[in-house]
Amino acid sequence: MDMTTSPQKDIINDILSAMQCYPENEAFIIDDKHYTYAQLGEITASITHSLSEIKDERIGIVAENRIETYAAILAVLAGGKTYVILHPAYPKERNLKIAALAGLRTLLCTSDTDRSAFGTGHFRIIDTDRLPGKALSEQQSHSSDEERNAYIIFTSGSTGEPKGVPITRANLNAFYRAYSSLDWNLDEHDRMLQMFELTFDVSVVSLLYPLTLGAAVYTVGHQDVKHFKVFELLEKYELTFATVTPSLLQLLSPYFDEINLPSLKYLGVSAEASQTELLERFRKSAPNATFINLYGPTEATIYCTCYRIPASDKCKHYNGMVAIGKPFPGIRAIIADEEGNELPQGETGELWVSGRQVMKGYLDDPEKSTLVLIHRPDGQIYYRTGDLCILDSDGDIIYCGRKDYQVKIQGFRIELSEIEYTAQSFFKTPCSVAAVPLLCDGICNELHLAVETTECTQSALIEYLKEKLPKYMLPKQIHCISQFPVTNSNKTDRKKIAELIKEKKL
C-alpha cells in the first residue's frame, strides 16, 4: 500500500467540490429512493443557512435514515460546528444524559420524527425538511479552525456513564488523508454501503468518504433487519464496496451458497475480531473482492491499521482471529508491557498508538483521559487501546484479544479467545461462540460458553473440550442461543449474554 499522504486534502471541501463536479450523480439511495448530488447540495445549503444564525458550537442531530439527516451532518461540518448524534431508539434518559454532557441546545430532525425520546422542551428544534430551499451555488467551500471538534461520539463507559470522544477536524482530516492514500481503486462510478448506526464512528467514513469521490451511498436504517437489508442492497444494486461487521457476516452465513456478488471490489471487516474461517467461506460469494481487516478505536478516529487478507493458508491470525496489519500513514504503534516499556517483536503486550488521529482527551473528563493518554520519552502522546497484540517479523500487528478478555480463575490466566477457537473447531457447520466470564465483585468465579445454534449436543462438546483444554479452562455450563444479541454497532453483545446467563434465561 502507498504510504504517502496528501497534506492539502480536507474532507468537507472535497465533498463540497464533488457536489459541484457531479450534480447529476446519485449521492444517496435510501429505501430505494434516489437523490442526486445537486439535491443533497441544496438541502445541505438550506440547513447550513439556518444554522448560520445560531451561535451554538455543538448541534444535536436525530439519527434517521433520511436525506435530511445526512445533509444535516454535512451542514454542521460545513458550518464549522460540531455534531452529536441522538438516537430515536435509545431511552429518553440516555439521550438527555448525552445532550446534557454535550451541552446541546439545538436539535435537527424532520417534522415527522417521534420526539418522545428527546424531551423536546429541552431543545430548539429545527425541522430540516421544512426549510426554504437554497441553490447549490450558494454552498461555499468551508474554512474552519482545524482544532475545533468535528463530532463527538459517546461510547459506553464501564460505570454506565456515557464517555464523550471529541474528534477534531485535524483528527478527521488526518484520518481522511491516510485512508485515501491506501490504494483503493474507487471513483465516482462506485456504489458503496453504509450499514452502521450514526452513533457509531465507522458510519463517519462509510458516509463521508464515498461523497468525496462523487460515488453513491446505499444506506440501511435502524428499523431494518440489518443482515437481510445488507444482502438485498449488495445483490440488487451490485455494490462495489462494503464494510461490515463479522457478526453480520455470521448471520448471513446460512445463505452464503445463495449469495453471488461478482461486482464487489472490496469487502472491509471492522468493529470486532474477524475469524479466518468465516471470511474464507465467504470468498466464493464475493470472488472478485479484496478482503481488508480495518482496525481502530474511536479514540484514534475510526481506523488506524489495516491488513489485506490473503487466502486462508497465508492469512496471519491468532486463535483464528485475523491480524490487524500495519499502521496507517502518520500513525506510530508500539506494543507495551504493564510499565509502558516497548516490547520487542514476538512478545505479547498492549497496543499503544499515537499520531494526528488520536483524540486530545475525553469530553470534560481529565481523570479518564490521563488513564489512557500517556506521554512517552519519544515526545509523543499514546492512546492505550486495551487490545493485546504481537508485532511479527514483517511489521504486522497480530491481534490477540482484549485485555479484558483475559481473566484469572484460581490464579490461572485464561485467554477467552483460546476457549472460543477450540470450541469452534468442534462444529462441522461453523457457528459463533462466546466464552463468558461471570464476575462477582470484579473477580471471575466461573466460565460459561454460549453457542449460536439451536442444536448442540452439549455433553459431546464438553467431552471434546476436555480433550483439548486444561480443566481450569473448561466452562461450567454450555448455553445454546438461536441468535446472539448484538449491540447498536452490530457487535456480539457479550454483556447481554452474561446478563441472560445470570438471570437463568438461557
Image (spheres, rainbow, N blue to C red):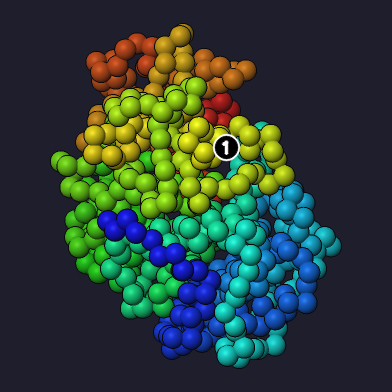
Q: Nearer the viewer, residue 11 or 252?
A: 11
Q: Residue at x 43, y 62 (%)?
A: 177
What residue does disc 1 label? 373
Question: At x 52% / y 30%, what residue is drawn?
Answer: 498
Q: Please identify the quadrant where the N terminus is shown.
A: bottom left
> Residue sitting at 33 percent across and 75 percent down?
187
Residue 89 occupies which quadrant of the picture? bottom right
Where does residue 265 sit, x and y in percent of width and height? 26, 65
The crowd level at tag 1 (other Cα within 10 Å; few <14, some 14-19, many 20+) is many
Dot 1: element: strand
Residue 134: x, y in percent? 64, 89
Tell me if residue 140 can be seen: yes
Left or right: 157, with 118 as reference point: left
Seen in the image, is 103 located left or right of residue 36? right
Seen in the picture, residue 472 relative to 155 is either above or below; the reply is: above
The location of residue 339, given as percent across then percent down, is: 50, 22
The amino acid beneath tag 1 is: Leu
